[in-house]
Image (cartoon, grey):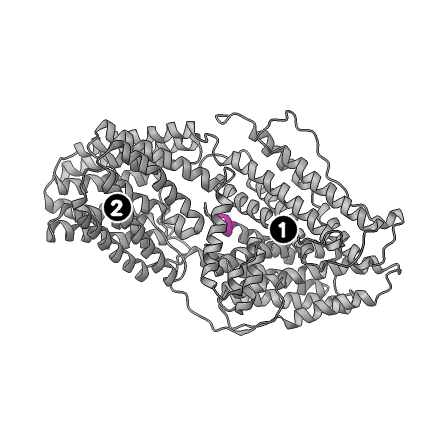
């Protein structure tokens, strides 16, 4: 935890845009963000296509403007402040320009186009580790590559293609900035604010002697809401920017606060009779948590951490004044552990909240980065803060450059599938080869079973769209007047469908758009729909084959691997931290491996939960395991933050160190059940129990320090048993064939 104080006065700001919280009862599928997206697309895409085709008379400009409009307004959905969205759209435009040039340069050779697709697609997909905006723009950027790579064209057409795409980028960005729903990041801040206030209410009620269970229920519900909001997307809703990383850390700290406070109130229930020094500490903790809620709500909040820091110091001095040989000393240490752990967590949470709100003292950022990444940033000391972002990005890439990373595996699998689709499209000589690649991209999922199910829905939707398009063309004909009237309507439905209507409905709507669009370019009647069905079928087949060959089980196997890594790394970090806090180790504990394993686990679990189909393992069990790894890591972090005492080994410290080693071995044993090797029947795995070294007559000079370490271990060991059943379920599912 970074020491220091902060006094900040904040002013209320109005949100940039308002998102819908409900839907009209007469429209079951209503979604206001989707409706706003559809309106933007309907206003921009047909107009751009008409400008390129009718005014400029250039088919390349018209085609790339239309598809660029879909990429900018439908496929990409950037969040954050308007500055964040502007940067994201600019980045997408620049990346798309490079990809258009590369795609046009390689489309003359099947071999070259297929080989080039692998690194290009991998780089675009893997760039999603940078944050939600990068992940959201991946499909849009890939469209900028596959459209020219799988279509005939020469380098002489690059200026027209770039011109059409940039028209779409400029017009689409302006439309997004003018008419944009509220970003998911706002919902995360609101959920975090509600959780912080609920925790403050719980502490205030306990300090007043109020044991109303409704208060605890509100805390649990607020914590679950925060967790649901944070995990509801297939990728983290926070990016690599320092405020985003602070928000990411704040979510974990609030969950840790909830865990500590719920346990404390459950054990003591009535805190009105505890010693005054601990009452004041908990009261200041509640004040800080309430200020966090106001800070995240952009309210007028005066933040001052000095009172909390002062009460932390007084709590330490209070224990030092007590007689360590007295009967009540151990109980006093136990109570102090609960109070000080909650206070330290709240202090760290406030530091992160200040950074997330762009209100922190710059001197607080380096220490927080140490907590987030597990490594120091020497560039900060040199005053080169811009380099810190590059170091952070390099750290993220290094953490995910592993077969344990769902991002790495998904990127490899997607790159190979798209390369195969490009090759199939060129070798079969289909009329619109990029539809094959688009079909592959749209149905590719993380498991073979999910890809197959999505492929069937895509084909069904395409057939339905063909029928609807054919009927439409038979009714209105292929005259330009009727088609120009039908185009905005078709774009409206196709733009509204993603995320609001079933996947098949979206495919059907897009097929109708394609039928109208290409009949405007070259009237072919309903036959254009037949061509699209054939191409989509080829793309679906490519995706399914690649899905069976590469990673057929999907994210579930990676979840098991990353759970095992997180358990082992957390146990090792805990053992190092215990020895550090006991003075048995002089080298500082290294949190890097535990943090990296935790990040990979979070991403893998998101990928698994985003997979379509039923899950044999309840979501609550999975998050219980994740919470178990987080408790081990944060307990170790708390111990690593203690001063290294100048004390030699004694019987008390040695026994505590041995128990920490046994706990790390237990985590390793549990992790071994989740590994790729099938150990056969899984035996009952009993967690170790905490044994107080004083029961064996051990004596120690610095009793306060040792007891403090013992309280950490006791608190952690009390929740180990709940990890065993879900871990055994994961182990059982891990070793079943993927088709079962």
Magenta stretch, residue numbers: 228-233
Give the answer, above or below, for where 48 lies relative to 684: below
In screen coordinates, is 667 left or right of 383?
right
Magenta stretch: dominant secondary structure = helix
Specify few, some or many for label 1: CA neighbours under 10 Å numbering under 14, 14-19, or 20 or more: some
Position of 354 compared to 414: left or right? right
Identify the residue at image location x=56%, y=51%: 224
Q: Are marks 2 and 1 in contact (CB under 8 Å)?
A: no
Q: Secondary structure at mark 2?
A: helix
Q: CA distance from mark 2 to mark 1?
A: 44 Å
Q: Is residue 664 left or right of residue 598?
A: right
Q: The residue tagged with tag 1: helix, strand or loop?
A: loop
Which numbered tag is attached to residue 100? Answer: 2
Label at residue 161: none
> Within the image, what quadrant is residue 616 found in?
top right
* Mark 2 or mark 1, whichever is nearer to me: 1
Answer left or right for 431 relative to 83: left
Name the N-terminal-most of marks 2 and 1. 2
Compared with 611, 344 (above or below) is below
Res 237 visible: no
Q: Nearer the viewer, residue 437 or 286?
A: 437
- Which one is nearer the viewer's eye here, 700 or 731? 700
- Number of residue marks: 2
Query: Looking at the image, is 221 positioned above or below residue 565?
Result: below
Q: Position of residue 82 (x, y in %)?
A: 37, 62
The quadrant of the image that shows the N terminus is bottom right
In the rendered image, which residue does mark 1 sit on? 590
């Amino acid at each position: 935890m970074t020491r220091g104080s902060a006094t900040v006065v904040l002013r209320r700001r109005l949100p940039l845009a308002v998102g819908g919280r409900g839907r009209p009862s007469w429209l079951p599928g209503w979604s206001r963000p989707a409706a706003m997206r559809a309106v933007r697309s309907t206003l921009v895409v047909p107009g751009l296509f008409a400008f390129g085709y009718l005014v400029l008379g250039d088919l390349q400009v018209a085609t790339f403007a239309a598809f660029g409009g879909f990429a900018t307004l439908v496929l990409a959905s950037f969040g954050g402040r308007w500055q964040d969205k502007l940067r994201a759209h600019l980045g997408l435009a620049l990346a798309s320009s490079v990809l258009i040039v590369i795609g046009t340069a390689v489309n003359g050779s099947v071999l070259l186009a297929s080989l080039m697709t692998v690194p290009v697609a991998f780089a675009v997909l893997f760039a999603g580790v940078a944050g939600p905006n990068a992940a959201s723009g991946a499909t849009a950027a890939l469209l900028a590559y596959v459209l020219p790579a799988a279509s005939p064209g020469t380098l002489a057409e690059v200026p027209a293609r770039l011109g059409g795409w940039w028209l779409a980028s400029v017009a689409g960005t302006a439309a997004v900035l003018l008419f944009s729903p509220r970003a998911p990041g706002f919902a995360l801040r609101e959920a975090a604010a509600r959780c912080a206030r609920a925790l403050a209410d719980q502490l205030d009620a306990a300090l007043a002697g109020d044991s109303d269970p409704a208060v605890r229920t509100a805390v649990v519900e607020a914590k679950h809401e925060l967790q649901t909001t944070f995990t509801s997307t297939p990728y983290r809703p926070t990016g690599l920017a320092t405020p985003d990383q602070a928000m990411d850390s704040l979510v974990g700290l609030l969950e840790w606060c909830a865990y500590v406070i719920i346990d404390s109130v459950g054990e003591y229930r009535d805190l009105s009779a505890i010693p005054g020094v601990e009452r004041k500490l908990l009261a200041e903790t509640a004040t800080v948590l309430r200020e966090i809620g106001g800070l995240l709500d952009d309210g007028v909040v005066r933040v001052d951490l000095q009172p909390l820091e002062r009460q932390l110091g007084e709590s330490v001095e209070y224990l030092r004044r007590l007689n360590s040989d007295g009967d009540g000393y151990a109980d006093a240490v136990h109570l102090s552990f609960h109070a000080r752990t909650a206070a330290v967590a709240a202090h760290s949470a406030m530091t992160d909240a200040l950074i997330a709100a762009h209100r922190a003292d710059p001197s607080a950022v380096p220490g927080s980065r140490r907590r987030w990444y597990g490594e120091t940033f020497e560039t900060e000391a040199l005053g080169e803060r811009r380099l810190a972002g590059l170091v952070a990005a390099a750290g993220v890439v290094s953490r995910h450059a592993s077969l344990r990373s769902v991002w790495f595996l998904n990127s490899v699998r997607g790159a190979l599938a798209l390369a195969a689709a490009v090759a199939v499209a060129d070798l079969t000589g289909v009329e619109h080869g990029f539809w094959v690649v688009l079909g592959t991209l749209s149905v590719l999922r993380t498991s073979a079973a999910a890809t197959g199910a999505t492929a069937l829905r895509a084909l069904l939707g395409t057939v339905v769209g063909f029928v609807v398009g054919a009927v439409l063309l038979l009714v209105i004909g292929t005259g330009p007047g009727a088609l120009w009237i039908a185009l905005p309507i078709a774009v409206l439905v196709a733009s509204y469908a993603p995320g609001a209507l079933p996947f098949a409905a979206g495919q059907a709507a897009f097929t109708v758009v394609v039928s109208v669009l290409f009949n405007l370019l070259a009237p072919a009647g309903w036959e254009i729909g037949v061509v699209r069905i054939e191409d989509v079928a080829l793309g679906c087949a490519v995706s399914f084959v690649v899905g069976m060959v590469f990673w057929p089980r999907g994210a579930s196997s990676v979840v098991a691997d990353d759970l095992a890594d997180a358990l082992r790394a957390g146990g090792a970090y805990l053992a190092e931290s215990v020895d550090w806090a006991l003075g048995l180790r002089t080298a500082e504990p290294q949190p890097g491996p535990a943090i990296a394993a935790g990040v990979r686990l979070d991403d893998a679990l998101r990928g698994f939960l985003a997979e379509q189909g039923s899950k044999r393992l309840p979501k609550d069990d999975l998050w219980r395991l994740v919470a178990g790894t987080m408790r081990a890591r944060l307990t170790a972090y708390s111990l690593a933050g203690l001063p290294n005492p100048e004390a030699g080994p004694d019987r008390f410290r040695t026994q505590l160190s041995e128990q920490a080693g046994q706990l790390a071995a237990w985590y390793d044993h549990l992790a071994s059940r989740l590994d790729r090797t099938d150990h056969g029947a899984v035996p009952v795995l009993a967690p170790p129990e905490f044994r107080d070294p004083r029961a064996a007559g051990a004596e120690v000079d610095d009793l306060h320090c040792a007891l403090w370490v013992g309280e950490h271990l006791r608190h952690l060991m009390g929740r180990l048993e709940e990890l065993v059943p879900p871990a055994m379920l994961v182990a059982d599912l891990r070793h079943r064939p993927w088709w079962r």
